[in-house]
Every structure is written in structure tokens, then in C-alpha cells.
Image (cartoon, rainbow, N blue to C red):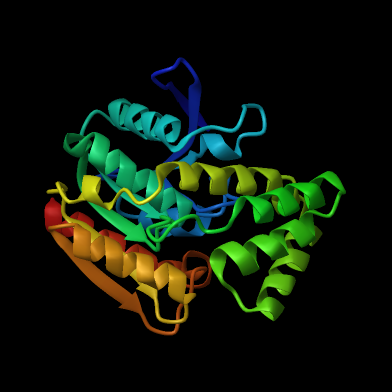
Amino acid sequence: METTISADGTDVRFYDEGHGRAIVILGPGLDDGTRTKKLAAILANRFRVLRVHRRQYRLDLEPCSVAQEVDDVIAVVRHVGEPVIIYGHSSGAVVALEALAASQSSFAGAVIFEPALPVNGPWTGPEVIKQMRAEIAAGKRGKAMAIFMRRAIGLPAWQARLAGVFTALIPHYRELVPRQIDDLDAMHGVGNHLAAYAHNTVSTVLVGGSRSPERLTAVVHAVAKAMPHTETRVLRGRDHGADLKAPKEIAQVIAALADKVS
């Protein structure tokens, strides 16, 4: 794992693989940079891929704001030394959008997968966040995650329960559950920031899955409407986990954009 230094002096950690045009990857919730390993491996055959261990999911640091994660991304771009392609997924996609708004010159292109942007108000009310934190305090991280999947993401109850059980069974994910709630708070801190994205001139592809929850696909449409220079792609038969279930499809979208802007 490589490091560079962010604006506030914090070290930024990332995996650096392959050679060629640089692609920076920001994973979704519960990701410490390892979730996107398969996606990165596919892309690293042709590109230099830097997958960031997002600050929000570093247990050696305090929870953070999206603005701090944006500073981390800009630090990675400075480390590369030239404009990069950025891929962001879910909450990582919000960080990517905010980075585009903060420093367009840092990016040659962007692929944004179902950003978890609360365009129609907070994903959940404060009472739900309080309930999730109470479950975590009681040692019931799987139940907290089930509540998150149901109330924030909008999965059917049975799918949310399964997601909670799956999370609880895997230590790597279970330990990051409190940070998922912090990440949700950070998304609420951004709010509906569509007006800031209207000035984007970076070539951008917005991606969604045809089987994703309606509230996520609605965000894709809202961002597409607000941003110029965008193309929207719908992956048929895919959902919010397409990066895990179909990494080759995601890699093809990213590679096509990288080739287009080269």
C-alpha cells in the first residue's frame, strides 16, 4: 500500500497497480479499498489503477466529512502528477462528484455509479440513525446494517435482513458497520448539491443498474439532468452490487471513457 499526504497532514492510503493512464477508484460503504480488487485487476492490464482506502473507513482515524475525503482524492491526483479518470461507487460516487466540483482540472473523465446523494432530503430521519447506533452499541451490527439497507437504501425487508446477516458473518465487514452510519451522516452533510455539479465540463458517465432500488436510480436521473457533458448507462439485470457481480462490465465502461478522453 502506498501513501501520500492530504491537505490537513493526514496520510492517504491507496493501492497502486498497473501502468498507463491513471484511474482512481473510490469504493462504496464498508470498503477499505479491497472490495474493488477484482475491478482494479481487470483495469490494471491496461491502466494504472489507484484504489483508495477511504478515510471514512479507516479505523485508526476519526469519522470524517466528505470535504476531507475530497482533499484526500486531490492529494492522490497530485501524487499521480496529471489529470486522472475517477470512478466512484455509491457514497464513493458522492466523494467523486464533490471532487469534480472542487477541482475540475484534476480530472480527465469520471464514471459515477449510483451516487448516494440525498437529493430529496435525508435518506433517513435522525431517529433511524439513533436506532442504528443503539443496535451497534448493543453488539447487534447485523441488525443495524439491516435497518440501514431497509430504511436508507430502500431494499425489500427480506433482502435487508439477508444483507444484515451476511455483514454480521464476515468480520471484515462487521467491524466497519459503525463507519457506514458515519458515512450516512456525511452524505446528509452534503445534501442536495446538484447546483454545484451544473458547472461540470469533465466528460462523465453516470451508471445505474436496472435492478437497483428506485431511490438510487432516481438519483442517477437527477444528477444526469443537472450535469452537462454526461452520458447515462443502464446495466441490464444488474443492481447496486454490480462492481462485485459484474466487474468486467464496470471495467468496460471505465476503459471506454479512458480511451475516449486520451
Identified at 71% across, 65% down, the residue is 146
The image position of residue 19, as x and y in percent, is 31, 43
Q: Residue furthest bottom?
A: 237
Q: Is residue 256 visible?
A: no
Identified at 40% across, 58% down, the residue is 115
120 displayed left or right of 262: right
14 displayed left or right of 255: right
The image position of residue 220, as x and y in percent, is 33, 66
Viewer-proximal residue, 118 or 42? Answer: 118
Identified at 44% across, 49% down, the residue is 92
Figure disc tally: 0
The image position of residue 79, as x and y in percent, is 33, 26
The image position of residue 140, as x and y in percent, is 84, 55
Q: In the figure, 9 relative to 74: above or below? A: above
Q: In the figure, 46 relative to 163: above or below? A: above
Q: Is residue 219 visible?
A: yes
Q: Residue furthest top?
A: 9
Identified at 16% across, 54% down, the residue is 203
Q: In the figure, 20 relative to 72: above or below? A: below
79 displayed left or right of 128: left
